Image (cartoon, helix red, strand yellow):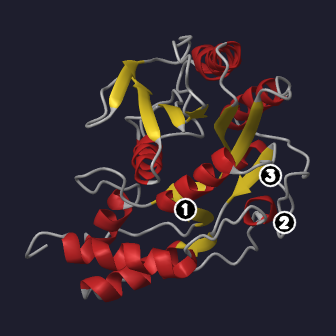
Amino acid sequence: MKIAVTGASGYLGHFVMNGLRHAGHDVLALSRQPFANHHHVEYELGDAPEICGMDAVVHCAFSHVPGKYRGGEGDDPEGFRLLNVDGSITLFKAAKAQGVRRLIFLSSRAVYGPKPAGTVLTEDTPCTPDTLYGEAKLEAEEALLAMADVGFQPTALRATGVYGAAYPQGWHKWRGLFEEFENGHPIEPRQGTEVHGHDMTAAINLLLTAPKAPRIANLSDILVDRHDVLREYADFAGLTLPLPARVEETFNVMDCTALRSIGWQPGGRKRLTEFLSGLRKSAPQGA
């Protein structure tokens, strides 16, 4: 397939670009910065790119304050909404008008908002986002799905937190956490659901190629507590340091039956262990 990926130079975009190319697709990077060894078209949210001839689009681009999704609007909520909602809708309309048949929108579990502890989140769970981030994702989802017809098959992929090293230099979202831990700083207890970037890309590939893809699909793999991640990391690193307490409240996990029904099989705890052990193996000698 010929697939255009927005936000290709970003953290999630790197996973998607490399994963789709590895799967044999012809991939076009739509981003502000060129993507090494890929065809590239300069793109910013709000543009209506020339993508005639593409079979599909994967929309990963998202404008936010660096390092933040929730709270990513900073001091400009109007600009945040304009770029991420109106800008996404401009892309959706351009894709449909130019004959793109499939579009995957990388949405978020934030669309569900707060729910009673222990609630299992399904695609039918009512959405009551309590952040501008969640509201923007939900508004874009609704606009996209309203465009669906026989010739245009979109999917809103509601992703949980994504971990793993996407960039060649090995940056990952937990690097700061691990550095704070190694330096002996107290770590705040936290728990959340996660999926590895490779499993995210595998899900996207299945949605692009499935005969009948779901309109909405949850994307999540494992429930992660910082206590357990840091304990495992410390074991690999040979560290003896205080660990944060485990979170006692029951977390709301995501039901991913829709993805599993089209053959998705994520890596689970084994993939997390491989990632953590690989961090130590790839570290410079003496690190």
- Measure the alpha-carbon separation of dots 1 and 3: 25 Å
The C terminus lies in which quarter of the figure? bottom left
Of 21 and 245, nearer the camera is 21
Mark nearer the N terminus (1 vs 3): 3
Residue at screen point 52% across, 34% down: 3
Q: Secondary structure at mark 2?
A: loop
Q: Secondary structure at mark 3?
A: loop
- Measure the alpha-carbon separation of dots 1 and 2: 21 Å
- Give the x, y percent position of residue 72: 54, 33
The N terminus lies in which quarter of the figure? top right
- Give the x, y percent position of residue 221: 63, 68
Label at residue 120: 2
Q: Residues within 10 Å of mark 1 (few under 14, many from 20)?
A: many
Mark nearer the N terminus (1 vs 2): 2
Task: Give the residue type at disc 3.
Answer: Pro
Task: Give the residue type at disc 2.
Answer: Val
The residue that mark 1 highlights is: 199
Q: Secondary structure at mark 1?
A: helix
- Give the x, y percent position of residue 268: 57, 76
Residue at screen point 61% across, 16% down: 87
- Position of 257 compared to 125: left or right? left
Q: Is residue 245 visible?
A: no
Q: Residue at the left extreme?
A: 285
Residue at screen point 70% across, 19% down: 96
Label at residue 167: none
Q: Is residue 268 visible?
A: yes
Task: Give the residue type at disc 1.
Answer: Asp
The residue that mark 3 highlights is: 114
Of 18 and 127, nearer the camera is 18
Mark nearer the N terminus (2 vs 3): 3
- Measure the alpha-carbon separation of dots 2 and 3: 12 Å
